[in-house]
Image: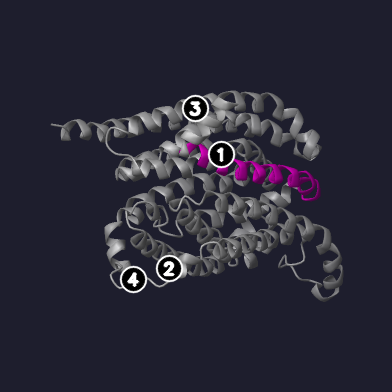
Amino acid sequence: MKRLRDLFRSSEMLKNIVTLVSGTAIAQVFTLLLQIPLMRLYSPNDYGAFAAFGAATGIIIAIAALRFDLAIMLPSSDVTARVVRNLASRSIIFVSLLAGVAGLIAGPWFAARYNAPYLRWWLPIGALTIFLTAEATTRQFWLNRQQAYKPIAANRVLQTLAVGVFQLLLILLLPRLIGWLRPAAQGCTCGFVQPGYLGLIIGGILGLGLALVWIVRNTRDLHNPLPPDAPTMWQVAKRYQKMPLLNGLNTLVDSVRWNGISLIIPAIASVASLGQYNRALLIVQAPAMLIQGAINQVFFQRLAQAKPGEMGPLVAKTLRGLALISLPTFALVAVIAPWIVPFVFGEQWAEAGWITTAFTPWAAVLIMASPVSTVFVVTETQQRSLVFAIIYCVVSIGVLLISPFKFLTTLWLLSGTMALLLVVQLLMAWQVIRAFDRTAEADSP
């Protein structure tokens, strides 16, 4: 115990990781506990249509800040970082408004495609989801820069709990409300009177809104007046132009891949299969997010400060630790998922248990690859990451589209392919790290 206490006292990075892990762990526990009643009350079709809504908005959320949110960590001056944060916030407002207009145009197509009439009317409201999620993320980056990890952890817990509780309350209360509204909605096919649709969407928006209000109160310093010598938004936009041009495009490609899979699944299977896939990912990502989410933020903060010669040892040490955690964790998940998922969440989710097992190879490698991928941002070699992202996107979606196998076998093939591609990304990152560290040797006398 004394050695453990000494280790925590001597390692600031370890203490920060533990702070975030504790918050993420509580959030994941709440997520899984709330899924027990939620998945018994909502059907696979409900979650399938909701996943389509989430995929459509998720593509935009990833780039709403034009990736200037990531640049908040990079300036040496807090004043410049605040200007970058303001630029990211303005970008979010602009992109969210554009998304609302796009939702009005694309809504009828989505409604017909997924046999979900509500999407025609609720897809434009996805602009609100985009704003709430992206704005909270920019403020988390600011807190990360200030090494204020406790508010980040608390915000994760609050958001997870609020979304789940609101969704649960709404599925319980909406049937009675709809009973009052139905006489006035005779003949209406707009989907506003479907409790499954309403509960998931409105519950998510209310939970995100509450979490944003809380984090705004904990980042009041962002609203203080800037000094007269602060750079302009145009100046910081020019300085970090690689963020939207390269990193933003990279993120967009990744988002298209990730959310495109959800949009394709109904075409090769069904909306209910999309619901099974969506819940399986939530389950397999619960341990992944527990490990990855906290380490990503602390690791990125340390990596941004690393000098030539320090990056390689930092990354190697992190990878060893992640491998020791992820491999046995997901081996266990792969074995128990097919029987524990239907036992806990209900027999209607038996398929989700097998899909969870199928995605464990990808999740195990993702935990190691995700934090290391920020190497390309810190070393400003995003063009390499962009090339990889395009290949990753094309191959992953290609596997899904051309696979001659049944749905579950196709997902096994997809998981294995994505895991191998992430190993390639790790090798690419290591080349960049070695080149960065060699600049220390070149500068030495």
Q: Which residues are magenta?
A: 13-42
Which amino acid type corresponds to the residue marked 1 in the rendered image? Val
Give me the disc on residue 18: 1
Instruction: Give the number of the mark in front: 3 or 4.
Output: 4
Secondary element type, mark 1? helix
Q: Are marks 1 and 3 in contact (CB under 8 Å)?
A: no
In the image, is residue 271 above or below residue 210?
above
Q: Is residue 37 magenta?
A: yes
Residue 267 is situated, as x and y percent measured from the top left of the image, at 60, 46
Which amino acid type corresponds to the residue marked 2 in the rendered image? Arg
- Whether residue 366 appears in this view of the structure is no
Q: Return the disc, 1 or 4, that comes first in the chain's sequence.
A: 1
Marks 2 and 1, how far apart at CA: 33 Å
Q: Which residue position holds label 4?
A: 227
Give me the disc on residue 409: none
Q: What is the crowding at mark 2: few (fewer than 14 residues within 10 Å), some, or many (at least 20)?
A: some
Q: Is residue 115 magenta?
A: no
Residue at position x 52%, y 30% from top? 6
Q: Which residue position holds label 3?
A: 321
Secondary element type, mark 2? helix
Residue at position x 47%, y 51% from top? 144
Secondary element type, mark 3? helix
Residue 270 is situated, as x and y percent measured from the top left of the image, at 67, 45
Q: Which residue position holds label 2?
A: 90
